Amino acid sequence: MMRLDSQEADAPLFGDDDDDAPTATRQKKSEIKHPLAAFFHLFFRTSAILVYLLCEILSSSFIVCMVTIILLLSCDFWTVKNVSGRLMVGLRWWNQVDEDGQSHWVFESRPATSRKVPTNSESQIFWLGLVVCPVLWVIFVFSTLFSFKFKWLAVVIMGVALQWANLYGYARCKVGGKTNLRSMATNYLGSQFFKQAMAKQGP
């Protein structure tokens, strides 16, 4: 039996509060403190997309291109899930099995009181790469169907599955594990509609 569980960290996430100096709070918001993590956050996913788009130019072998794309997607999934999300925005999600054999999904975010505050630049890079690339893979699914290139269907579906899994996991971490994402979207659209209506009634 699988049960969806979520939690926010009460203890310091990844031990950051124990060994971080107070000067970390004075880091510039535009500074990229983890350039290597930021690089690989974008490298694997953009490389997979480029190989898919240029596969006919790069190699005449479908098998070579397919294996390369799958390897890049797998490396991207592991990197984003285990490294870049933790370092760049202080979020992580995973699955654990308790002593009763029940599976729990855990969505965790670094406490607001943490000294390790994500910079604006790193946050923008993280979320931009996390959102844009899955949308592109969805477009590839439709283009594959409309162009009747069904041999690529398994590859693009894998791209959608792996990248949307990370997007969903980090979205749950960001808004809080117990928050309903549909309710959040509805509330956001309602607030935007209200603002537009008030603006039109203004002088």
Image (cartoon, rainbow, N blue to C red):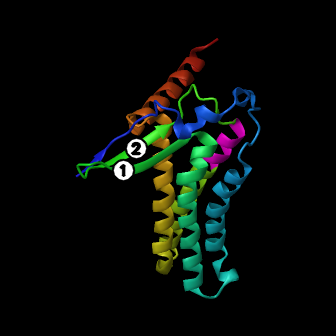
- Residue 114 position within the rendered picture, expressed as x and y whole percent measured from the top left: 59, 29
Residue name at image x 51 percent, y 72 percent: 144
Is 120 positioned to the left or the right of 176 in the image? right
How many discs mark residues in the rendered view? Answer: 2
Residue beneath the point at 63% across and 63% down: 44
Which tag, 2 or 1, sits closer to the chain's start? 1
Magenta-span inclusion, residue 125: yes
Q: Which residues are magenta?
A: 120-128
Residue that extends furthest to the top in the rendered view of this protein: 203
At label 1, the amino acid type is: Gln
* Residue 81 screen position, x and y as percent: 52, 53
Using the image as rendered, state which of residue 32 and residue 186 is in the foreground: 32
Q: Crowding near pointer 2: few (<14 within 10 Å), some, many (20+)? A: some
The residue type indicated by label 2 comes to: Val
Circle 2 is placed at which residue position?
Answer: 106
| Disc 1: which residue | 96
Q: Dots 2 and 1: beta carbons under 8 Å?
A: yes
